[in-house]
Image: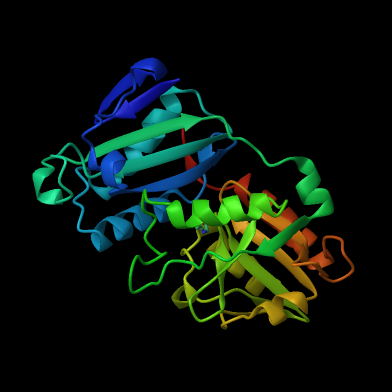
Amino acid sequence: MKIYIDGKYYDERNAKISVFDHGLLYGDGIFEGIRAYNGRVFRLREHIDRLFASAKAILLTIPLSHAEMMKAVIATCRRNKVQDGYIRLLVTRGIGTLGLNPKSCKAPSVVIIAGKIQLYPEEYYEKGLDIITVPTVRNLHSALNPAIKSLNYLNNILAKIEANNGGCEEAVMLNSEGFVAECTGDNLFIIKGKQLLTPPLSAGALYGITREVVMGLGRDAGMSVAEPNLTRYDLFNADECFLTGTGAELVPVVKIDGRIIGDGSPGPITKALVAQYRTLTNSVGESIYD
Ligand code: PMP
């Protein structure tokens, strides 16, 4: 695999970042996780838009233009002959002193890794996930806004550990007011009658690209799509529930905190949305090889 770092390609063993990079020292940086399907990068423009929005929020100047960043992602995929894969794009604050002040960092670094995707086991999609609410509360938007896809994922990692300790793969994270925010690496949806509901961004959710696509699919299917504040009670009494994310796509959830959702198996609307999402990912995107 060839890794892009600041305009050059390196072998895996030579792809290195300084120990003085504030991305490592302080988690000072941003990232994106992107998928390629059938030789096309899915929703690349939206991912780069979100990267630039995260950069703006943390006052980080990305050394490439939006168009150059899109080209760099495509070029890295081409270089690695990616057909179906996962792309990790990072922008770090760059090399500085040991002090936390980003003023000491003269040049941000751009890293692009385009490789294979580690898929969730097929069983998760067939049987659905059993998830739990964890004690770690999602970051306050007034402290570190969860809309910023920053390199500091400790909040999510702690919740992930708590989920694993409880014997689960994923966790429901609540915000400081007790409303549902999202999961550790995925957005959360419920279906109630003809309504498709997901927490608002203000509840502490990432502006998920998959979330946005699924909301569009729901609208196309004639569902009423809304972003109300949701409580655990709403989750327990949903007809169906699923998670969305670039890596996970759509994963049905069949149990939350011991409460069985619907009839305990992936629901019909969830299954239909999974199929529609897969059709879409296989047919649109920025072409890598044209
Ligand atoms: N929430 C969090 C915390 C995430 O890290 C992610 C991305 N893995 C998502 C939601 C889903 O976002 P997307 O659909 O853009 O991958």
Looking at the picture, tell me which residue is in the foreground, 163 or 284: 163
Q: Which residue is drawn at 32% across and 21% down?
A: 9
Relative depth, front residue between 56 and 146: 146
Q: In this view, does 27 lie to the left or right of 188?
A: left
**In the figure, 152 relative to 222: above or below?**
above
Q: Which residue is drawn at 52% across and 28% down?
A: 82
Residue 243 in view: yes
Q: In which quarter of the image is residue 52?
A: bottom left
Q: In this view, does 267 lie to the left or right of 55?
A: right
Q: In this view, does 228 lie above or below 13?
A: below
The residue depicted at 67 percent of the width and 55 percent of the height is 250
For the image shown, how many numbered marks are present on the structure? 0
- Rendering coords of residue 219 (x, y %): 64, 74
Query: What is the x, y in percent for residue 246?
Result: 56, 50
What residue do we see at 10% from left, 50% from top?
A: 103
Q: Where is residue 239 in the image (x, y as percent from the top left)?
A: 80, 75
* Image quadrant containing the C terminus: top left
Depth check, front residue: 285 or 49: 49
